[in-house]
Image (cartoon, helix red, strand yellow):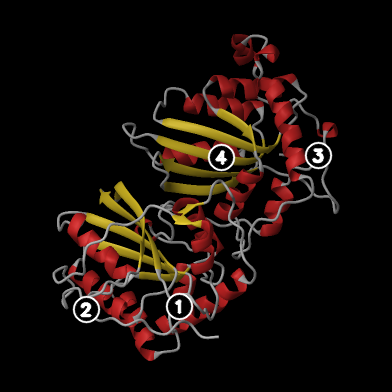
Amino acid sequence: MEPQHPRQRAGMGLASKGGCSQRPRIRNPVEWLDRQTFSFHFRNLRFANGRNCSYLCYQVERLKHCSPDSSDWGVFQNRVYPETPCHAELCFLSWFCAKKLSPYEQYRITWFLSWSPCSSCAEQVAAFLRENRNVRLSIFAARLYYFWKPECQHGLRMMHQQRAWVRIMSFRDFKYCWKNFVYNQGMPFKPWKKLRKNYQFLVAKLQEILGISATKRHRLGDLTTGIYFLTDMEARSPRSRSLNTMNLLKKEIFKQQFGNQHRVPQPHYRRKTYLCYQLKQLDGVTLDKGCFRNKKQRHAEIRFIDKITSLNLDPNQSYKIICYVTWSPCPTCARELVDFINGQDHLSLQIFASRLYFHWIKVFQRGLQQLQAAQVSVAVMTRSEFEDCWEEFVDNQGMPFESWDKLEQYSESISRRLQKILSRSNWNNLEDSFRDLRLGSPSPSSLRSDSR
């Protein structure tokens, strides 16, 4: 099968120099796609038939001091007017130029496209970027439009040369769109057959078209895995812009160390402490993320505190920190976290633990209670948190998270135990708890085969 026949471009011009005069009729975006439309038109087939419409999901962020200050979201569809047919890309540009663009502001725009731009649209997008140096554009395409035709290849290269970040949508991008642009009625995104295989095929074609060398692929990240290590201005997702780079966990390490089974499955291994964190603004933009594990005499929680302290966060801004830990904090770390969070009203800390560490010992229970008393949210990881951790911190090579046997059952059991610990009936006296908190670990190695 072949893609749909090229669409005619009569009467669709932005100004030839990239301005916004002679633009097509301004059309406002819609807010949502329905599930059927998204599943049909965004399916990343190598060769697609009957998909003559093009959809564009966008986010526009106005930047202030290199950080997002405000944002707009929406969806455009290509339309055929009696006199002026207009593709989704040009519909967006006409709307943006008329209602948003100012030469005195900096903008970061992200597009998720069902088709990569045709040659005509690509030429006009490149011209727009050439004339508007205050706009940065990231394009993630589900499919490549006539990728074997020289004129379409040339259009992609023109955009790339004008600083457009052109990439293929991965599993994570499809899931992001499903969550943010689709009226999904609470249903999770379900990947279709050959999503990853088609993704790898399209990535290879795009690399070939853009002439991305092996050296540049190494610098930007291996595009065949869907994992990128970018600067803040070049981040791959509008709500995942980390200011730093990090080493991703191997899939095997994640499943071994974050597994919430009551007993270590065979072959036996030691379960250690790993802490993965995300520092976010209240609008959901990720400012920093990383992963720590215990070192000698320095637990992962303490290393995490050191890192956040070193960032010198603005006390006039509000931040949210989400931590995923393999073991709940020991008494010493609980006390350090309480001391860290006290007096920092601009920080909100959430801790999701895969397992509870020595939960039957009273001093460990008191540590968890004191965290809650300090307004630190302590909860047990559910499938949702495991999925998020898998996508954010694991070198998953574009593969979706696959749960292990009885994940939900174990999570519910551990959660019930945590709720009993945190319930007020189990609190003897918080003041005594703070006074009695031990700095050393009370647990001899004979108590448990697992170790932090």
Residue beneath the point at 31% across and 77% down: 122
Of all residues, the one furthest to the front in this rendering is 82
What's under tag 4, amino acid-wise?
Cys
What's under tag 1, amino acid-wise?
Leu
Q: Specify the label residue 323 is tagged with.
A: 4
Q: Specify the label residue 262 is tagged with.
A: 3
Q: Which of marks 4 and 1 is nearer the N terminus?
A: 1
Label 2: element kind: loop
Per the model, the C-alpha gap separating discs 3 and 2 is 66 Å
Q: Specify the label residue 144 is tagged with.
A: 1
On-image quarter of the C terminus: top right
Crowdedness of circle 3 by 10 Å Cα count: few (<14), some, many (20+)?
few
Crowdedness of circle 2 by 10 Å Cα count: few (<14), some, many (20+)?
some
On-image quarter of the N terminus: bottom right
- Report the side of 389 relative to 340 (left or right): right
Label 3: element kind: loop
Q: Which of marks 3 and 1 is nearer the N terminus?
A: 1
Look at the numbered discs 2 and 4 and tell me whether their residues touch, using CB distance below 8 Å.
no
Per the model, the C-alpha gap separating discs 3 and 1 is 47 Å
